Amino acid sequence: MNFLKKLFGHSDKNDKPSEPIFPGESFSISKLTLPDGLGLATFNNKYNNYPNKQFFPWYVLVELEIMDKNANGHPIDTDAEKLVKLEDEILGFLNQKHTVHFLGRVTRNGFRDLLYYIDTPRFEQTEVNSFCDNVMKERGINFGMEKDPKWTAVSGFIK
């Protein structure tokens, strides 16, 4: 049977993601003890045992500076609203050229980290620089991307 599949262009190799591409949403919040204090992680548990990791192998980390913060370094309400708006803008930016999976965020002393996985990088460096330059008019931002086909960067938060 395998011979016939190969002969007629069918194989057992999975070359397309299985449905659903987006597994839905079910976020949980965890407290973290970090070297610089309390951290809060919010992650989408629907990505536990996600079968399509290999099709979205690029890890995108966006680190945002928290401007108006409480004693723990976490955003006060006014900055939290600005961060949520900025998170929407970042997702919109990434969605322009990618299939984007938002895994979650970690809020820590002075910073919020946003964690995504995408299919294949398609932005030119100038596009990323322009987007980040615009954000830096209000707050610091670091934008990083690396190949992580097994999603090890988020393995402490999802299975």
Image: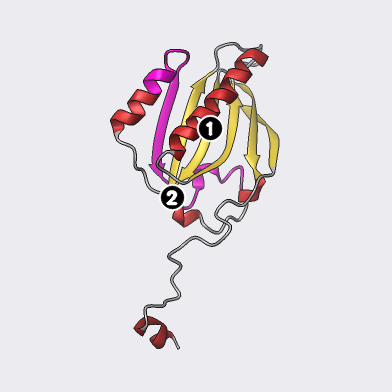
Q: Is residue 7 left or right of residue 13?
A: left
Image quadrant assignment for residue 41:
top right
Q: Position of residue 43 (x, y in %)?
A: 63, 39
Q: Nearer the viewer, residue 33 or 96?
A: 96
Q: Secondary structure at mark 1?
A: strand
Residue located at (65% from left, 31% from top): 32
Which amino acid does the dot numbered 1 rest on? Leu
Q: Position of residue 62 (x, y in %)?
A: 47, 30
Is residue 84 shown in magenta? Answer: no
Specify the segment rendered in magenta: 132-159
**Dot label at residue 57:** 2
Q: Position of residue 56 (x, y in %)?
A: 46, 51
**Dot label at residue 114:** 1
Which amino acid does the dot numbered 2 rest on? Pro
How would you rate the neighbour count of disc 1 (Cα within 10 Å): few for under 14, some for 14-19, many for 20 or more?
Answer: many
Dot 1 or dot 2, earlier in sequence = 2
Q: Position of residue 123 (x, y in %)?
A: 34, 37
**Relative height, residue 59 to residue 21 (above, below):** above
**Relative height, residue 103 to residue 135 (above, below):** below
Is residue 149 shown in magenta? Answer: yes
Image quadrant assignment for residue 102:
top right
